[in-house]
Amino acid sequence: MNILIWLVVGGVIGWMASWLMKTDDSQGIVLNVVVGIAGAMLGGWLLTPLIGIGTINQSVFSPIGLAVSLVGAALLITILNVFRSDPLH
């Protein structure tokens, strides 16, 4: 049951991050879930040591933990956009 909750919350966080970063039109449900979960991992690696709060990947479903996951997902989208952009234009 935990994996189902993890996927749903990861999808919501991925959708919120894609909406925040204005990439919602180019992403589907599966990519939102992947971005949400991978972004939570990224947020956990980068932000957790600084502020001491876990993410959804560490079973922390507090508002601050969800916010750390959202920031990590938005950061992941930003990194992906940098690599996907055409340097000639």
Image (cartoon, rainbow, N blue to C red):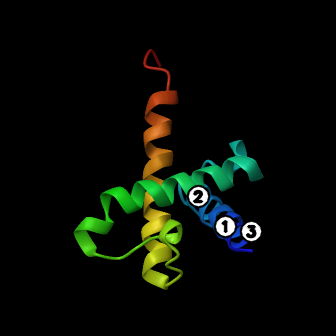
Indicate which disc, 2 or 3, sits on the residue closer to the N terminus.
3
Comparing 14 with 61, the one in front is 61
Looking at the image, the residue that sits furthest to the left is 50
Residue with the mark numbered 2: 36
For residue 50, which numbered disc appears in the image? none
Residue 50 drawn at (x, y percent):
23, 68
Residue with the mark numbered 1: 12
Residue 10 drawn at (x, y percent):
63, 63
Residue with the mark numbered 3: 4
Q: Secondary structure at mark 1?
A: helix
Q: Secondary structure at mark 3?
A: helix
Question: How would you rate the neighbour count of disc 3 (Cα within 10 Å): few for under 14, some for 14-19, many for 20 or more?
Answer: few
Q: Quadrant of the N terminus?
A: bottom right
Residue 44 vertical position relative to residue 84 in the rendered view, above or below: below
Residue 32 drawn at (x, y percent):
67, 53
Mark 1 and 2 residues: CB-CB less than 8 Å, in contact?
Answer: yes
Residue 81 vertical position relative to residue 63 in the rendered view, above or below: above
Q: Amino acid at mark 1?
A: Val
Question: How would you rate the neighbour count of disc 1 (Cα within 10 Å): few for under 14, some for 14-19, many for 20 or more?
Answer: some
- Foreground disc of the pair 2, 3: 3
